[in-house]
Image: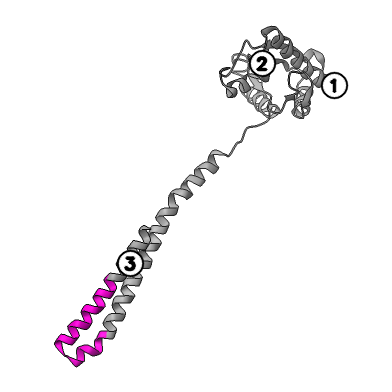
Amino acid sequence: MAMNKWEDELGKQVLESANAAVDESKAMGNSVLQRFVPLVLIAVVAGGFFWFFQGSSTLEAADHEPAVEETSEAHSSNITTAATLAEQMANYLATEASDSTTANTTALPSFLFQDLTFAVGSADLMEATELESLAQLLRDHPEVHIEVGGHTDNTGAADANLKLSAERAAAVKMRLMDLEVPAAQITARGYGLTQPLGDNATEEGRAQNRRTELRITQR
């Protein structure tokens, strides 16, 4: 709407300039000046259209600039470089091996399983592909011992959650043993709802609390 009004105003200005030039030439009665009237009209019209298109291009660029920045920012925010649990552990072990001054003084870390999925309310493993790379790492490092810890949100009875978390941790241990990791390297323990990471009052917080962790207990 604003662009149409601006175009109408430009047209009026060009027309008024042309009419003024014609009136002036008639009043002067100068034949030489009359021969230049068409050239003056052409110059006025050409200048008006040049100004119009230049202004339109500037406005169009200004309108699109915030959208480009917003798209770029959203794209960058959607980029993730999170490593798998086995990769995180391997990086940790390599760092510790290269720095003997911290090998016996730093706290032993914990890692979150990222692609470990159980059936709802059950200890049945639905997705456990990351356990294969973890098993390979543990077989390559028999000196490393781990604890698999099961955690739940606060939905349901505390005793039932404690039992479920222990069963899920045990299921992970059994799968690792099936992948030829010695039982002596793995401890399984259920914590139920006692160690929340998020707020159990929100769905997002409860999702954070339903998790399985791996903690290195010996290296």
The correct choice, above or below, for 121 with respect to 70 in the image is above
Residue 218 shows in the view: no
Camera-nearest label, 2 or 1: 2
Q: Which residue is drawn at 45% across and 53% down?
A: 64
Q: Position of residue 143 (x, y in %)?
A: 75, 17
Nearest to the observer: residue 100 or residue 90 = 90
Nearest to the observer: residue 183 or residue 114 = 114
Task: Bin the neighbour count of mark 3 within 10 Å (Cα to Cα): few under 14, some 14-19, many 20 and up.
Answer: few
Q: Which of marks 3 and 2 is nearer the N terminus?
A: 3
Q: Does the magenta stretch include residue 22?
A: yes
Q: Position of residue 40 (x, y in %)?
A: 26, 81
- Alpha carbons under labels 3 and 1: distance apart: 80 Å
- Alpha carbons under labels 3 and 2: distance apart: 68 Å
Q: Earlier in the sequence, mark 3 or mark 1?
A: 3
Residue furthest top as drawn: 159
Camera-nearest label, 3 or 1: 3
Query: Which mark, by number, is residue 152?
Result: 2
Nearest to the observer: residue 65 or residue 108 = 65
Q: Do the residues labelled 3 and 2 touch (CB within 8 Å)?
A: no
Q: Residue at x 57, y 39 (%)?
A: 78
Query: Which mark, by number, is residue 8?
Result: 3
Q: Name the residue under label 1.
A: 178
Q: Which residue is drawn at 43% across and 48% down?
A: 66
